[in-house]
Amino acid sequence: MDMEFTPEQKTVKDILGSGSQLVIPRFQREYCWDGKVVQEFYEDIVSRLDFTQKKIKTLPYFIGTMLFLYKKGTPGDDETNIDDSVIEVVDGQQRLTTITIFLAALAARLNDESQVLAQKVFQYVKTTDDNDDPLAILTTKTSYPYFQNYVQTPVNKRDPALLVTESDEDESIKVAYQKFEKMMEGDNLKKQITTVCNLDKDALLAYSDKDILVAIRDELLSNKAIVIRTSERTSANMIFEILNGKGVHLANIDLIKNRLFEKIPDDGMVDNAEVQWKKIQNNLRQRDEGIGLATFYRHFWISKYGQASSNKLYDNFKRKIKPCTEDRYKAFLLEMEKESMRYSIVVHPRLEDFQNRKEYAPIVQSMSILSDWFNVNQSRIGLLALMDVKDRGLISLKEFADCAGMIEVFHFAFNSVCRYPANRFEGIYSKFAISLRKAATKADAKESLRSLRDDLDGIMPGKTVFVEEFCKLRYSGRGQMRMNVATKYAVNAITSARQGKKLFENDLSIEHIIPESKTSELCPDTLVTNIGNLIGLEKHLNEEAADLDSIGKRELYERSNYKWVSDFYSDNPDFKVDKIQERAKELAVIMYDKIIEPRMAVKLV
């Protein structure tokens, strides 16, 4: 079909001073510019100022393309037949929000110089309608009420009680405002511009702060954009996808959100799509602010629908989530909400997620190790599917624990010890997860578990290679060695195995049998920190051990509740530096034969 649109060049002053109210739809991505990007924008603006003449000159700056959706007017109203009282911002909301924040901070700064000028600037942030009622130029749902209470309220009328941030978007707005505020405050105003414009330190002495602030105002308002306007929503959506479809300007997750919200209408009472989207975000950040929505979505998609690179997620969504109806999209949002809660558990599991049932403790430990110790993000794809089929009763608790444990020891050997690349696992876990989710019976689920075991076993490092690499493991209490985590895992695993336990000891610390302080030419650092010189010891005993000689350590080790420690000197009656490498090989064999192989060979039947 033909696209109906009209492109025209407009200044920021034209856009914000037209009398129209600009509405950011609820399906648009939240404001997310960080301090660095805000500073770059500020520097782009002030770098256009020319201080070579008595009056500061401005040089208009192009800020890109914006897409606006107008309502159709009553036939015969005017030659364009559009209603421009309310305009929907389809593309350009990040820039317009930033400019509005900039103007609000500028008005607050100008208030120190001239209240009249400050009020004039603030009219581009908030004005009045024909009835003299307050009218915010830019309105948004996702940041309500913080944006209105902070940015769109004059600085002398803000209520501190209403300025509490409640979301990442609120924080981004606050950071942006404070960044603009700091760059224009006091002496910093001239210092910043002197640096950005590469001026002599005395170049701005002839200009007052008021002169410079007015020039910044004029430069900002004279910025130009190509505004594409249309009154056809279909045309707007097509243009939007052309502008953003390659993920250059907009992330795929934002395009997917737009698509979902477009099909799920706001009924005016409760915006169910917005409520669910917030739940998804809250699920992900309730334990760790670092869990990104885009990362979660990609792992969820790969776990359920198929492999896809980040820049193909939107295309895959359009192809696979059909029919494109309100009901189907509502169901998909519900899937995302449920999976986001599972993902949060996979990344940062707690026993309370499983009603504090102690039989789930090995699963919690395995997931924690994979996420926090090994940082193998690809395993989350498979773990999401395991949680799904466990919730559906298709695998037992033992099968869940055995499979998670198998994944744990595999990645210890493959990634942590042998340091092989992890790029192949996305495909392995995606195939496994999709197969497992499709299981209709317990027999189907068991077959998927066996298939994963076979796939991992097929690329498992052999014993000779493992022993060779394991003997290189080191640990130093003086600083973070690259392999500290792998070594810590090995010591914990062997200690637990010697205790006959599945769970790691809570009070374990790493003890250097020959103290690190005894490093010498005959006992170099490479040997003292080697795993052959390490053992797991209770923290309070480790503090006592310090620099004790072998006699003192013998007495202390015998007090340990760890069998591996209490038996150490009977197993190693004459332990000296020349025994370290031999012991490292012994530990490597124990690790491979007694811990890794049994968990890799577990019978998933």
Image (spheres, rainbow, N blue to C red):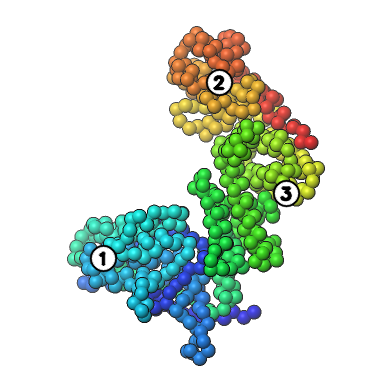
- Give the structural element (helix, strand or loop) at label 2: strand
List the residue tagged with mark 1: 110
Q: Is residue 177 above or below residue 484?
A: below
In this picture, residue 390 sits left or right of residue 216: right
Q: Residue furthest front?
A: 269
Q: Earlier in the sequence, mark 2 or mark 1?
A: 1
Viewer-side residue, 450 vs 258: 258
In this picture, residue 337 sits left or right of residue 184: right
Q: Position of residue 314 (x, y in %)?
A: 62, 62
Q: Quadrant of residue 402?
A: top right
Q: Position of residue 504 (x, y in %)?
A: 59, 27
List the residue tagged with mark 3: 437
Q: Residue furthest right?
A: 443
Q: Amino acid at mark 3?
A: Arg
Q: Earlier in the sequence, mark 2 or mark 3?
A: 3
Residue at 25%, 71% in the rendered image:
117
Spatial CA distance of label 2 from label 3 is: 42 Å
Spatial CA distance of label 1 from label 3 is: 60 Å
Residue at 57%, 62% in the rendered image:
272
Q: Amino acid at mark 1?
A: Leu
Viewer-side residue, 471 vs 46: 46
- Give the structural element (helix, strand or loop) at label 3: helix
Q: Are marks 2 and 1 in contact (CB under 8 Å)?
A: no
Q: Amino acid at mark 2?
A: Ile
Residue at 64%, 20% in the rendered image:
498
Q: Quadrant of the C terminus?
A: top right
List the residue tagged with mark 2: 535
Q: Position of residue 286 (x, y in %)?
A: 51, 47
Spatial CA distance of label 2 from label 1 is: 66 Å
Q: Earlier in the sequence, mark 1 or mark 3?
A: 1
